[in-house]
Image (tube, coloured by chain):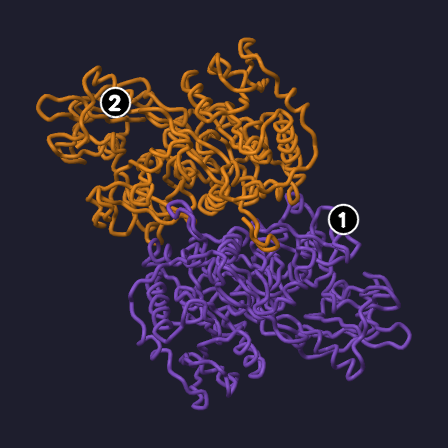
Chain colours: A purple, B orange
């Protein structure tokens, strides 16, 4: 940056692994089944891969795509790719070949590193210069000859152990591009810079209370906002990464004990999976669980507390490096009963320590009153907000109208300044001119003891335009009649918000990160009718 | 910085108090005797003082000097002065009027805010535009009419509650100038920028494990490296500052209990004072004590552990925003016996999470071997190293020769990469061509049960050039003969390192920050002889 570099060093997560290798060289950095890598080995592998990518023709600024589950090679990529001066594109492993093809083409990826177990998702005409296949013995999958390319070992053989500088010329340079899940339209490529990734990593350490003793279980996909920057954060603090190929409750419980896990991150549905497992039992230590993706219901909060987990509720989007707000606990809350406290904890909260601040605004960018009732859109800005959408100036301009990033999430601001989401703009139900928050209806349903999980969407209604409908998964061995359940809800929320219908289902459609895909439920109900007009 | 400010925000500690007021508005921010300020009040007072300084003619970039003990007004200044766009010069309260006059003149301070109890230290012809006097009822001191000027209340009356932006135009702008203690020559003004102060604050939070529940006792002077950036760090995390006008063991023990203190910082001599008090007793919770200024002896480490304190040993200088390295604990250390562990913990360690890295180099800037024996000079660089000395390009250039800041501290590098100071360059004893580390000799003396505190310096010797001499303070009620003590030392270190003489003294000369002033001891012994030539 043209600054005297004796006292100005670019902020980059690369420095975290450099320090890890220096300070915690012999310490366990990565655990995956029987594999154990020390920090020295972690850094050596990142160096070898970076040199191999360069030897493969990857130039500074080139994009390198990865399609891997949460295995060590995916973690190494978070350092190896930027160490090569390139940009990491970690692709959602649940996407279809056509979607992946779009991301590879849009990002202009030069290389694709793919897991053999995901070869079915690799598009036939991928358009990348070379495909590298990781064959994970734990998956049992063999490479599909159709995919071609070289093996990960072939790639490594091209590399060397020649040290590379753990730094970048410009901290505002791009470290990764993360594609939005894009429930409608094409996914957009969110640009992360080194500075934002560095600062958000420090914020994750502070708010999730990581220490050098952290043993972090990878229940959250690394392709999701680079694991909310936890790929970099746990490395920065010198903790231990415990990899996990797939979210499996039995394996999670085994690792919680066998690896003495202290921290994990996940959407509330993942927590429901963990808490609902046969083997669930109170832990002999406090495990810190950071959750986001949907507000944890009071029921989830209570269940996790019963297991000995301390819950930290955060909120953000792909565009904000993952978490941007945190529901900071206040002194007075411990004196409240568990229900009152849970309601406060279910709010999205306030800006994290490195955040610029969060606002809830109306269409004219005016702050809504702090009344806990007036809805507006949540907007954010600062170092941990994306630099923009890759190769999409129009979408970037639209997202940043008024100088703030527009989340598309609707919420209120409480008198204490905490924000609370009421809904995604597209998830709000407009019934007879009244807005109904599906989150509020879901919380009322969820508080019934027979309910395991629930989703509420708007369905067409001749008279009201749309009306709420509930999709309910019951807890194993429990039952409840629809009318009894609705009586339970009527005691808790206004009559006009009570669903007209309840469908009991075996499971809910979810994204790879555990978010419930309401658009799938809506599609079932709306069929080929025109999509409703948003009020 | 000319960057699109929707996604790039300057790093400044000002943002920490803005967030504190927003997120922890009703929380106790500052405690001082009966006074309790919430975060909202803290921010309001900073705003009022900033506006008052502006109304008093303070322009952006002007220097504002403060001569206050650790009282709330000093803490407020850490935000109020930069909020006014000005630069804080927090002056060491132990300095003589002539020294303070030099600092006021060198910094060109426009305003001096001084405590009535320190009026005797205010030079008659201060040269500043205006003196503001804080009269602290707890001190019992009245303003000296000689000093003149206005009262703090007068200053506040000039202010307003008009909000000011909690930001700066350039994160590389100066936030404070801290004058070195300058045991020889004139003190130099160390330039801190907003970026460095911000990043070092986050590092303090991480390494001292601060949380929103932190209740921090101000045993470390705020004028000392801005309290190692803890003025900003504890504010950033939303902890509670417990002010302390003077280091008094009885008052410290009262506050440890009455205010449920969780954290404090201090030099090992401060810890000796705390541990040696009649009222010392094991605490019912872990208090995290961050120590620097001298390596804590194994004895201090053991005594603090017995009280329930967890010790974090850090090292740095005024030029590095306070702490730059930390002695990170490694997994294997817990299995060691307390003596072996204490020896490892007494080392200065490795770069902190935001540090660029620390080196030990010879005169040609070559790294010394990692053998724990070869001495070299400790050098550092990066965001948490000063931008230079104010108005002293020559000293700046000399300090940064070879592109790294030269600490003047001599040390070794161990095979595990940890650095360990052997001495200040000027504290090493050169005896018959051999270098003797006074620290090593002191540790040997300190391990005797009758010894409370010790300092070793070189004294003139006809044959050897110089020889070590010990100054020893005994524990109350304990006694030991000099020869018995030296026998104890002979069992522990090489014969040539054993002092030739022992002086039993009532106390050791110390700086305001609790560092032992060896130069005073040396002066007594060397009288008007020429100072020894450094080998």
Q: Which residue is mark 2?
A: B471
Whether A35 is drawn above or below B400: the answer is: below
Count neighbours of disc 1 (C-alpha within 10 A) and say few if under 14, some if 14 to 19, many if 20 or more.
Answer: some
- Asked whether B3 or A24 is in front, the reply is B3
- Asked whether B276 or B419 is in front, the reply is B419
User: Please, which residue is most extreme toward the left here?
Assistant: B463
> Is residue B521 shown left or right of residue A129?
left
User: Please, which residue is most extreme toward the bottom here?
Assistant: A146
Q: Which of labels 2 and 1 is toward the front?
A: 1
> Is residue B426 shown left or right of residue B353?
left
x then y, percent, for residue B13: 54, 41
Quarter of the image containing the C terminus of chain A? bottom right
Q: Please, what secondary structure does the residue beneath circle 1 have? A: loop
x then y, percent, for residue B56: 62, 24
Whether B271 is drawn above or below A432: the answer is: above
Residue appearing at x 31%, y 76% in the figure: A157
Residue appearing at x 42%, y 57% in the figure: A169
Marked residue chain, label 1:
A
> What is the CA distance from the residue labelled 2 to the residue labelled 1?
64 Å
Q: Which residue is mark 1?
A: A370
Whether B295 is drawn above or below A43: the answer is: above
Residue appearing at x 52%, y 85% in the figure: A123
Q: Please, what secondary structure does the residue beneath circle 2 have? A: strand
Marked residue chain, label 2:
B
x then y, percent, for residue B333: 33, 50
| Count of marks overlaid on the render | 2
Q: Quadrant of residue B408?
A: top left
Q: Quadrant of residue A481?
A: bottom right
């Amino acid at each position: 940056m043209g600054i005297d570099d004796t006292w100005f060093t670019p902020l980059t997560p690369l420095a975290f692994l450099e320090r890890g290798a220096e300070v915690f060289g012999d310490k366990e950095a990565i655990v995956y089944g029987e594999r154990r890598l020390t920090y020295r080995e972690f850094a050596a592998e990142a160096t070898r891969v970076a040199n191999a990518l360069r030897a493969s023709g990857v130039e500074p600024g080139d994009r390198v795509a990865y399609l891997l589950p949460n295995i060590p090679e995916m973690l190494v990529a978070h350092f190896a790719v930027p160490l090569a001066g390139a940009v990491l594109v970690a692709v959602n492993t649940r996407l279809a070949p056509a979607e992946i093809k779009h991301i590879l083409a849009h990002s202009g990826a030069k290389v694709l590193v793919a897991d053999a177990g995901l070869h079915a998702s690799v598009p036939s005409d991928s358009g990348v210069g070379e495909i590298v296949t990781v064959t994970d013995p734990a998956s049992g999958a063999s490479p599909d000859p159709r995919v071609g390319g070289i093996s990960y070992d072939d790639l490594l053989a091209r590399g060397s152990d020649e040290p590379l500088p753990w730094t970048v010329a410009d901290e505002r340079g791009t470290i990764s591009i993360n594609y939005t899940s894009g429930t409608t339209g094409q996914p957009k490529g969110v640009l992360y810079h080194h500075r934002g990734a560095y600062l958000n990593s420090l914020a994750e350490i502070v708010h999730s209370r990581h220490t050098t003793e952290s043993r972090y279980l990878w229940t959250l996909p690394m392709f999701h906002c680079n694991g909310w920057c936890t790929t970099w954060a746990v490395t920065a603090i010198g903790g231990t990464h415990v990899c996990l190929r797939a979210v499996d409750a039995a394996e999670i419980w085994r690792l919680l004990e066998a690896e003495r896990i202290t921290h994990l991150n996940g959407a509330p549905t993942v927590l429901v999976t963990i808490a609902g497992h046969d083997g669930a039992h109170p832990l002999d230590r406090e495990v810190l669980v950071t959750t986001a993706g949907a507000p944890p219901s009071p029921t989830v909060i209570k269940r996790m507390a019963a297991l000995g987990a301390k819950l930290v509720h955060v909120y953000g989007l792909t565009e904000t490096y993952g978490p941007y707000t945190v529901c900071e606990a206040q002194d007075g809350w411990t004196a409240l009963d568990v229900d009152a406290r849970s309601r406060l904890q279910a709010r999205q909260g306030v800006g994290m320590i490195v955040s610029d601040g969060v606002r809830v605004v109306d269409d004219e960018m005016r702050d809504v009153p702090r009344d806990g009732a007036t809805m507006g859109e949540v907007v954010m800005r600062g170092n941990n907000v994306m630099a923009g959408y890759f190769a999409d100036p129009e979408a970037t301009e639209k997202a940043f109208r008024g100088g703030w990033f527009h989340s598309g999430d609707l919420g209120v601001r409480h008198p204490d300044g905490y924000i609370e989401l009421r809904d995604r703009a597209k998830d709000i139900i407009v019934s007879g001119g009244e807005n109904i928050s599906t989150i509020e209806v879901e919380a009322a349903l969820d508080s019934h003891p027979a309910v395991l999980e629930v989703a509420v969407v708007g369905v067409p209604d001749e008279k009201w335009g749309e009306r709420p409908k509930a999709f309910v998964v019951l807890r194993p061995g429990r039952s409840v009649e629809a009318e009894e359940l609705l009586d339970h809800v009527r005691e808790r929320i206004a009559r006009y918000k009570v669903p007209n219908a309840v469908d009991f289902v075996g499971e809910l459609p979810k994204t790879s990160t555990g978010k419930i895909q309401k658009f799938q439920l809506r599609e079932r109900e709306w069929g080929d009718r025109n999509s409703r007009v948003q009020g």
